[in-house]
Image: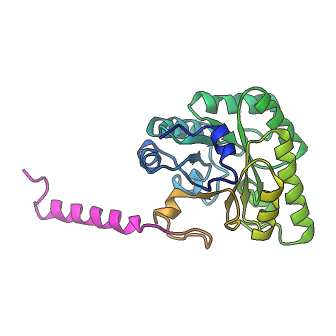
Amino acid sequence: MKKWTVSAVVAAKGKEKLGCVTAYDAAFARLADEAGVPILLVGDSMGNNVLGFSNTLNVELADTLRATAAVCRGAKDALVVADLPFGSYQGNEDAAVENAIACIKAGADAVKLEGATAAVCALIRRLTGAGVPVLAHVGMQPQSVNIYGGFKRQGKTREEAERIFADAKAVEAAGAFMVTLECIPADLAAQITAALKIPTIGIGAGGVCDAQWMVMHDLLGLNEKVPGFAVKYLDLASLVRDAFSRYVLDVKNGEFPPV
C-alpha cells in the first residue's frame, strides 16, 4: 500500500471516495492504517471522546502534539492531519504558524483549522506558503459551539447556505487542499462539492462529498450516544465491558493468574 499524500488525496476527487476517521493513539491508528483508512485526523474531538469534556474547547496544543506523535508512530500509510485546537491559531498569526509547524514536527502531514474569516484565510495562505498543507473546515464549527448555543446544524436558511458556499470558495482560494463540510444540508454539500476543485470531506453533510469523516469512537461503538449521521459498525463497548467483568470474576474466583 502506498503512503497517502496531499497530492494523492486531491487526485482522488471524482475517482475514489475516501472513508476517513479520527485517531488519538498509536494502537488504534495502527489498526485503522492496516485496514486501509486513507486519512487519520488527530481531532480536537479528543476532548469529547478521550478526555471526558463536553466539547472540544478544553483541548490544549500539548494534547494535540502528544496524540499526533502517537498516531504517527502507529500509522505508516495514512495521511495524518493534526487538528489545531481552540486558542492555538485564533490570536497572533506568528504564534499560529509556530503551533502549526510544531504539529508537522510532531509527525503530521497536514493541519486542520476551522473557519473562513479574513484572518483565517490569511493564515491558510501563510501556512501553505511556508510548506504546511491545510485542511479547512466550514459549516458547523465545533470550536464555535458557544456562539451557536450548542452543536446545531448550519446552512438551513438561504443566507446561511450562501455564506457557507462563499466560505468554501474562500478557503479553496486561500490554498487549502481539502475542506470539511460539517452538519449542513446534503444539497448544499453537493453544490459545494461540484463547485470546488479541491475535495470535500463531509460529516453530517450527506453522501455526495468526496470523502467522509467518522469519529472512531462512534464507529466502534465506544460512545454511549452516536449522532444520527454516524453508523456504529461494532459494539466494542460491550465486548470490552464483558472482558473486564470476566477478568474481575476470574481474580475473585482464583482463576487468574492461570499459573
Q: Is residue 209 left or right of residue 171?
A: left
Question: What's the colour scheme?
Answer: rainbow
Where is residue 58? Give x, y as percent.
Answer: 64, 49
Work out which residue is located at the far front of the displayed protein and give it: 15
Instruction: Examine the residues drawn in magenta and state their main secondary structure.
Output: helix
User: From the viewer's perspective, is residue 168 above or below residue 87?
Assistant: below
Name which quarter of the figure residue 5 lies in. Answer: top right
Work out which residue is located at the far left of the displayed protein and give it: 259
User: From the viewer's perspective, is residue 235 above or below residue 202?
Assistant: below
Name which quarter of the figure residue 158 lies in. Answer: bottom right
Work out which residue is located at the far right of the displayed protein and give it: 159
Query: Does the magenta run of residues contain 193?
Result: no
- Residue beneath the point at 55% across and 69% down: 226
Query: Does the magenta run of residues contain 247?
Result: yes
Where is residue 216? Give x, y as percent.
Answer: 51, 57
Over which residues does the magenta segment extend? 232-259
- Residue beneath the point at 64% across and 29% down: 102
